[in-house]
Amino acid sequence: MVIPLAILTMTPRAYAQAPVAAAARLELWGGVSAVLSGPSGDLVSSYSPPLLFDGEFTSTGTQTMKLNRQPAAGIEGGANVFLSRHAGIQLLVDRTSIHLSGGNGPYDLTLRYVSRQPPNDQAQVIDVRQSTPWPDTTGAVTQWTAGINGIVRMELVDRV
């Protein structure tokens, strides 16, 4: 009597399964991206331009550039490639163009060196100071991002 009872309790749950449709092996997708922060602030450059002769000299070149970024939108797209039913890789590319603007200071150059000129080879101090106005910053920076990620696909069932 025990065996028929076990069969009767399992019978209501036994049913034929419909064939499961094969999951897609390639998924293409696209979207919109947003950049809320980007390059912004002051770019201060200062260096010592080299001179081609030996001797005492000092040289400096300095400039301050200001960059103000603005929020920007971009576009992205990619492909999900499933190597098995539940696991695969994702390839993605994102392109964003960030607009920049800002006021710039002049390019200042200072050069001081000692020159010995003929005919008496007497030391002379040469002092050069130059300030070149620099136009304000305008333009855009284009940013490309590429990525490869591992992905997992989960199937939803009646009982999650």
Image: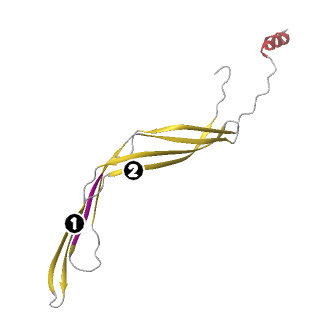
- Please give the residue where the numbered disc 1 appears in the rendered image: 130
**SS assignment at label 2:** strand
On screen, residue 21 above or below 45: above
Q: Nearer the viewer, residue 147 or 141?
A: 141
Residue with the mark numbered 2? 139
What secondary structure is the magenta-colored segment mainly? strand
Q: CA distance from mark 2 to mark 1?
A: 27 Å
For the residue pair 20 and 105, the one nearer the viewer reads as 105
- Kind of residue indicated by mark 2: Gly
Q: Is residue 153 magenta?
A: no
Horizontal side of residue 119 vs 34, given as left or right: left
- Residue at the spot 46% in from the left edge and 49% down from the top edge: 142
131 in relation to 20, above or below: below
Tell me what residue is drawn at x 30 percent, y 55 percent.
135
- Residue bounds of the magenta highlight: 58-65
Q: Nearer the viewer, residue 150 or 108?
A: 108
